[in-house]
Image: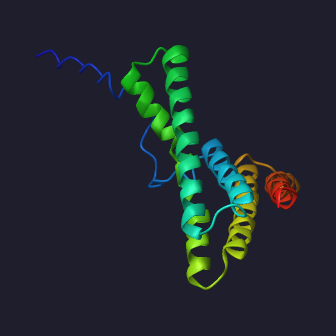
Amino acid sequence: MTDPAPDPQPDPLTAGDPPPRRRDLLGLVSGGEGTITGTVVCAAVIAYAGGHVASTAELCAAILGTVLVYWLAHLHAVTLGSSLTHRHHPVIALRHAVRETVPIIGASVAPVLVLVVSSLAGADLLTSAWIALVVTIGLLTGYSYLAGARGGLDMGGRIASAAAGAALGILVALLKVALH
């Protein structure tokens, strides 16, 4: 009888990687914190820049640029945190950070699409900005409800969770009103 082959050493660049997830490239279903952060960042940019830019293209550029900066900051922070806290190799830490933070970028897709579609449908910039802001409030409400459901809350808890998400979005809308 021969000895079985020794267990292969795990690849140090994939060690610690979680099992593959279902296809959710933008992380909007599985993203949690990043999805909320990205949506709030988009809403805040819409609230501020919606009255200070000359075109939908400028507003979209402001959203995408701001989201990119927030994403890079979070990517850096999560990479460092993973390396320092878990003593991960920098490549492993970066892979982990990309997976954890990509929803920040993914969350910008819906508001930008709403701005573009409403503009193409003939809405002026201010109307498009308000439509996109209302959509972000709806997204925050929906994400918060989903989190409550996945967390095992009963219907009352889910509604409370959704109300908290809606309140966050409404605060951003109030900021828009105060700024303009």
Q: Residue at x 65, y 42 (%)?
A: 33
Side of 132 relative to 177 (left or right): left
Q: Residue 126's image quarter?
A: bottom right
User: Which quarter of the image is occupied by the N terminus?
Assistant: top left
Q: Position of residue 130 (x, y in %)?
A: 74, 70
Q: Residue at position x 62%, y 49% from top?
A: 38
Q: Residue at x 54, y 58 (%)?
A: 61
Could you say where residue 82 lies in the image, as x and y percent from the top left?
Answer: 51, 22
Q: Residue at x 87, y 53 (%)?
A: 160
Q: Is residue 82 above or below residue 25?
A: above
Q: Is residue 124 above or below residue 39?
A: below
Q: Quadrant of residue 166?
A: bottom right
Can residue 116 be spotted in the picture?
yes
Does any portion of residue 16 appear in the rendered image? no
Q: Nearer the viewer, residue 107 or 86?
A: 107
Q: Say which quadrant the C terminus sits in.
A: bottom right
Q: How many marks?
A: 0
Residue 2: percent from the left, percent from the top? 11, 16
